[in-house]
Amino acid sequence: MPPVAASGFWSLTMYDEGRFFVPNALNRYTISQRDNLKANADGSADIYLQADSPGKDKEPNWLPAPKGKFSVMLRLYMPKEGPVSILDGSWKPPAITPL
């Protein structure tokens, strides 16, 4: 998960090609640790950025995307105290991997 303080948060927001929110059946435009994400056995979470539902069991981790081009914006608020790993490069967001 992104390195933010306990009182901070991160968010991943979906935009269409025109930089507008993507209309979708879930009315979900962003996903964050404030959502009830379904964790993997190792504590990580897969986030699905796709137009079609990944399946009901994976929908808690689904950020609906348009069928065409899109962009996502990762924001981190209140990084952890000490060296700021997002700024010094010791933490990098995971790559978006096409399936």
Image (cartoon, rainbow, N blue to C red):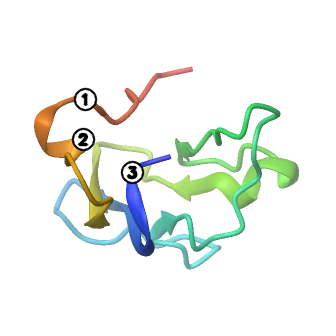
Say whether residue 17 is left or right of residue 52: left
Q: Point out the tag, 3 or 2, that comes first from the N-terminus.
A: 3
Tell which of 46 and 5 is nearer to you.
Answer: 5
Say whether residue 29 is left or right of residue 59: left
Q: Is residue 77 above or below residue 3?
A: below
Tell which of 67 and 83 is nearer to you.
Answer: 83
The label shown at residue 3 is: 3
Q: Is residue 73 above or below residue 19?
A: above
| Residue 2, percent from left and from top | 41, 49
Q: Gap between marks 3 and 1, in whole Å? A: 11 Å
- Mark 3 is on which residue type? Pro
* Residue ID at (85%, 54%): 56
The quarter of the picture where the C terminus appears is top right
| Residue 18, percent from left and from top | 16, 62
Q: Point out the tag, 1 or 2, that comes first from the N-terminus.
A: 2
* Residue ID at (24%, 41%): 85
The label shown at residue 90 is: 1
Q: Gap between marks 1 and 2, in whole Å? A: 5 Å
* Residue ID at (30%, 33%): 91
- Mark 1 is on which residue type? Ser
Q: Residue furthest right?
A: 57
* Residue tagged 2: 85
